[in-house]
Image (cartoon, rainbow, N blue to C red):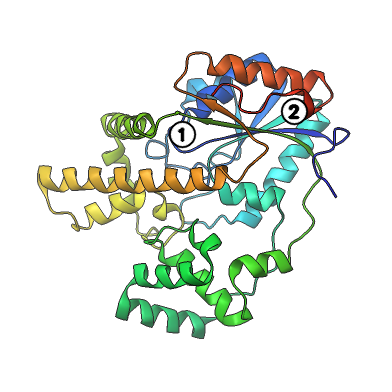
Amino acid sequence: MSHERASAPPVILLMGPTAAGKTGSAVELVERFPVDIISVDSALVYRGMDIGTAKPDEETLARAPHRLIDIRAPEENYSAADFRADALREIRAIHAAGRVPLLAGGTMLYYRALFSGLSSLPSADAGVRAQIEKRAHDVGWPRLHDELKAADPEAASGIDPNDPQRIQRALEVMALTGKTVTEARRAGRREPPEFSILRLVVCPGERTELHRRIALRFDEMMAQGFETEMRGLHARPELDPSLSSMRAVGYRQGWAWLDGAYGDGDEGRRIFREKVLAATRQLAKRQLTWLRKETDALWYDSSLRNALGGIHGDVRKFLENGQDRSQLIHGAGQ
C-alpha cells in the first residue's frame, strides 16, 4: 500500500547532510507557508548541548519554533522508537491545528523509523555482548565493523567504524536471530503511517564546498564557546562517554580530548579539530549515501543563490495542488 497518496495528510521532509543549510531553509519556509518544524536530530533533543550541536539560537527559535528540541537531559537515553512516538504525536497535533508538519534534520535513522516502520528486534543479551566486547578488545572495533560490512553491507554503511555501541548491537542481533539487522528489520517491520510526503534535500553541489562549510561551522562553534560547554559536560559526574549524548560527533572527540587522548596545549587542540572535522565529513558521507537512495526526493544545490526560490516554488505547488507530487519537477534547483 502506498503511503504517499494525494488524499493522505501532507508532510514535508527537509533533509540534507550536516552543515548543508537545513535550518536556514526551514526557517524561511515557516515564514512563507503554514508549516511547523519538527526537529529530526538525535543531538538536538538534549538540553545543555547547544553550541556543539549548532542548535538554533533563541532568536531563530522565536521566529520558527522547533518541536523535539531540549526534551531530554544528556544522561537520558533517547531511541529511534522514542522519536517515532514523539514525532507521530507532534504530526497529529500540527495537522489538528490545520497546519503542515515540516520535519527538518539529518538523523537518517529517525526518518527510517518514522516512515519505513520499526522492526521487533531482540532485547539485549548480556552474554552475547560480553563475547562481542572480548573480541573487540582482541581485534578492535574497526575489524568487527569490517566483519559486519561483509555480512550486512546495508547496515554497516550507516554505522561509523568507531561507534562500538551500534556495531555491537548489529552483531548481537545477528548472533541472536541468525539474520542480519537488515533482514530482521524487514521481517518484523511495523506498518508505516500513511502520509502524502514531499521529500526535499538541500546540499552544496560540490563536496569541497560542503567540507568548507563543515570547517567554518566548527571554527564558529569554538569561537562561541564550545570548549567551555564541553568542559562543563565533562565535569558532570552523571555523564560518561558511553552515553548516546556524548557519542554525538564533536562531543565524542571533545571527551577524548579532555581525557588527554590528544595531548595538551595548542597541539592537543589542533588534533581535536582534525578529529572532529574528519568525523563530521564521514557523517556527511553516510548521510549522503542514505539520501541518494531517496529516488523520489527533489534535490537543491544550497550553494546556489536561487536554491530557496526552487524550494519555495515546489512547496507551493505541493500545497496548492492537493499534494499532487506529479506537478513537481524532480531535480529542481540543481
The three-letter amino acid code for the residue at tag 2 is Val
Name the residue located 69 percent from the left edge and 59 percent from the top edge.
Answer: 118
Give residue 89's position: percent from left, percent from top. Answer: 74, 43
Q: Nearer the viewer, residue 105 or 281?
A: 281
User: In the shown orientation, is residue 257 left or right of residue 179?
Assistant: left
Q: Residues within 10 Å of mark 1 (few under 14, many from 20)?
A: some
Give residue 169's position: percent from left, percent from top. Answer: 52, 70
Q: Residues within 10 Å of mark 2 (few under 14, many from 20)?
A: many
Q: Nearer the viewer, residue 242 or 19?
A: 19
The three-letter amino acid code for the residue at tag 1 is Lys
Location of residue 310 with respect to 152 vertically, above or below:
above
Location of residue 158 with respect to 178 vertically, above or below:
above
- Residue 100 bears which disc, if any? 2
State the SS at label 1: loop
State the SS at label 2: strand
Residue 235 is at least partly visible in this image: no
**Number of numbered discs overlaid on the protein picture:** 2
Name the residue located 73 percent from the left edge and 67 percent from the top edge.
Answer: 188
Rendering quarter of residue 325: top right
User: In the shown orientation, is residue 287 left or right of residue 277?
Assistant: right
Name the residue located 73 percent from the left edge and 20 percent from the top edge.
Answer: 34
- Residue 55 bears which disc, if any? 1
The span from disc 1 to disc 2 (Cα, nearest Å) is 22 Å
